[in-house]
Image (tube, rainbow, N blue to C red):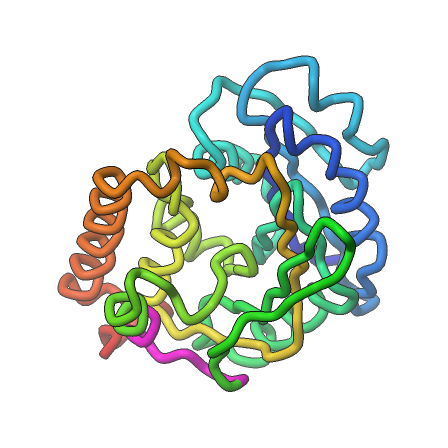
Amino acid sequence: MIRRITVVTAVHGPSARFLPDAYASLGEQRLPDDWEWEWAIQEDGTTDEVRPYVPEDPRLSFRQGRPGGPGVARTIALARATGAYVKVLDADDRLTPGALARDLAVLEADRTLGWTTSRALDLLPDGSTMGFPGDPEEGPLEPGVVLDHWKRNDFRAPVHPATLCVRRELLTALGGWMALPASEDTGLLLALDAVSRGWFSAEAGLLYRKWEGQVTGQVSHADPVEREARMAVAEARARALADLGWAYPGGAPAP
C-alpha cells in the first residue's frame, strides 16, 4: 500500500515566480518505494498572478481563497491533506535532496516524536548559501526546550519553523497554524514543543530564500507593538497547553 506525505505551500502573487524552483526541489526527492508525496498549494487571495506558475502534475492541487496570511492559507490547505505527515514548504523556498526521506525515517522509527525540524541555510540572491550559528546537536528535542530557548534569546527559536514536518493528527489537533499576521509558524512550533517531543536533523533540509519581497523583510514585520503582541499570544498558548497537561502521544503529560 502506498503511503503519502503531504507538502503544504502558501503562495501569494509576489512569491509565485518561485514555485517552479520549489517544484524542482520536490522532484529531486527520493522516497522509499512505498511512499509518495502530494503537494497542496493554496493561494492567499484570488488573483490571476499565481496560476501561470503552478506546474502541471497529478500529484498537485491548487486552490485559492480570501486573503488571511500564510498561516490561514496553510491551514485551509489541510482540508486536502491525505498524508500521514505534513511538510511545510513555502513558495519561495527549496527542499534539499533527501529532506523528505530523512523526515520520514525519523518519524517512522519513533512514535513518541511528533515533529521534526532540520538545519536551514539562507539562499542569497547570488545563489550562494549561508548557515546560522548556534544550531542544536542532532537528536531529540524534549518538550519545553524550544520555548525556553526562545524566551531567553529575544524570541529566537533554536530551530527553524519553516523546516517543520508534523504528524497530521497532531497538527490538526492543534488547529494548524496560528491566526497571526506573522510568526504564525513560530506559534505552531511553540505549541508542538509544549505537547510533544521533536527532532532536529543537523543536515540541511531547507534553502530559505532571501529576496526583496520577503514578508519577514518588510518594515511592518518588525513593528515593536505588533511584535510584542504576537510573541505574547504565542507564548500564552504554549504555556496554556503545557499547563493543561495534554501530550502527544496520549498518556502521561509532557514534562
Q: Is residue 82 above or below residue 79?
A: below
- Give, as a single range, the part of the protein colored magenta: 138-146
Q: Which residue is rendered at x = 35% and y = 79% of the image?
A: 142
34 relative position to 212: left or right: right
83 relative position to 220: left or right: right
Quarter of the image for residue 44 reads top right
Query: In what quadrant of the picture does the N terminus appear?
Result: bottom right
Residue 59 included in the magenta stretch of the image:
no
Q: Is residue 202 above or below residue 25?
A: below
Residue 141 included in the magenta stretch of the image:
yes
Q: Which residue is rendered at x = 49% and y = 76% of the image?
A: 199
The image position of residue 194, as x and y in percent, is 28, 66
Q: Which residue is rendered at x = 16% and y = 57% of the image?
A: 240
The image position of residue 245, as x and y in percent, is 18, 67
The image position of residue 173, as x and y in percent, is 36, 50
Query: In what quadrant of the picture does the C terminus appear?
Result: bottom left
Front residue of 111 and 160: 160
Q: Which residue is rendered at x = 77% and y = 30% of the image?
A: 54
Front residue of 214 and 219: 219
Q: Is residue 77 above or below residue 208?
A: above
The image position of residue 53, as x and y in percent, is 78, 28
